[in-house]
Image (cartoon, helix red, strand yellow):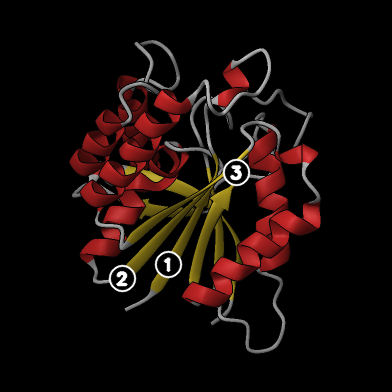
């Protein structure tokens, strides 16, 4: 059994980026902990007001728990930090919040956002997780990977940031249907086709990533570090 930590900026990112992989880990008997850092709603307001967004935040929190249950995650924790404002927080405070969860769960495998996403929270969280997972002696994390998030990773213009060039693929042919169900739990965050964050688009992406490695459906990652 492996202990796995999936770190996501917003509710739904964990399913968009690696929902099938979460389910595959669970199917293999691994313990998957999901950490969602920002609350995912108040950036849509003119001025941040958590009280005014209370109903929407409650729906998102319920969706996160439902999605985690569908995928077989052992736990889902939401930190409720400011949405799309992680760059306004002290970087050290963000790093320490990640380090605390790593110390608590002792994961062997960690998944986080790609460094070049257009969303600022994704980029800041990537930096924080890479720092929290620095390979000090006897550190628990042995594999660190970054995932793509439709409607963020592919929206970054060429040359503006590192391109997502996956070198690690996970076969989710047997888990795609559960990923679809978890996406449906986030119905309020999904968009109609042909939006990149539509279920149709995500199904096409899963089949394309699968075709790249000769399977029915896959999720793609960048392997950032591996200790064997």
Which residue is at the front of the view, 75 or 202? 75
Name the one closer to the observer, 159 or 26: 26
Report x, y in % for residue 143: 54, 70
Q: Quadrant of the N terminus?
A: bottom left
Rendered view: 189 above or below 169: above
Element class at badge 1: strand
* Residue 23 in the image, given as x and y percentages of width and height: 27, 54
The residue identified by callout 1 is: 4
Measured along the vertical axis of the image, is residue 110 above or below residue 51? Answer: below
Q: Residue at x 40, y 41 (%)?
A: 212
Q: Looking at the image, do the residues carrying marks 1 and 3 touch, with CB atoms under 8 Å apart? A: no
Residue beneath disc 2? 30
The crowding category of the residue bearing disc 3, from other C-alpha atoms within 10 Å (few below 14, some 14 to 19, many at least 20), is: few
Residue pointed to by mark 3: 165
Against 34, is 144 above or below? below
> Residue placed farthest to the bottom in the image?
138
Mark yes or no: residue 119 visible.
yes
Report helix, strand or loop for mark 3: loop
In which quadrant of the rendered view does residue 58 lie?
A: top left
User: Does residue 107 appear anywhere in the picture?
Assistant: no
Q: Say above or below: 135 vs 133.
A: below
């Amino acid at each position: 059994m492996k202990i796995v930590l999936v770190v996501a900026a917003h509710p739904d990112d964990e399913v968009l980026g690696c929902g099938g992989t979460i389910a595959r880990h669970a199917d293999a008997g691994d313990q998957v902990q999901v950490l969602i850092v920002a609350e995912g709603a108040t950036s849509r307001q003119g001025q941040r007001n958590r009280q005014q967004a209370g109903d929407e935040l409650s729906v998102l929190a319920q969706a996160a728990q439902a999605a985690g249950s569908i995928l077989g995650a052992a736990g889902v924790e939401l930190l409720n930090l400011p949405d799309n404002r992680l760059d306004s927080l002290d970087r050290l405070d963000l790093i320490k919040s990640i380090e605390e969860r790593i110390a608590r769960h002792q994961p062997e495998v960690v998944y986080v956002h790609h460094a070049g996403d257009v969303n600022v929270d994704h980029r800041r969280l990537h930096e924080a997780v890479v720092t929290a997972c620095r390979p000090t002696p006897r550190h628990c994390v042995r594999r660190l990977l970054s995932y793509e998030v439709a409607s963020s990773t592919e929206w970054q213009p060429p040359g503006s940031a590192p391109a997502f060039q996956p070198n690690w693929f996970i076969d989710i042919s047997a888990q795609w249907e559960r990923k679809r169900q978890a996406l449906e739990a986030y119905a309020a965050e999904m968009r109609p086709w042909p939006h990149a964050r539509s279920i149709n688009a995500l199904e096409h992406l899963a089949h394309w990533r699968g075709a790249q490695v000769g399977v029915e459906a896959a999720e793609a990652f960048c392997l950032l570090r591996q200790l064997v």
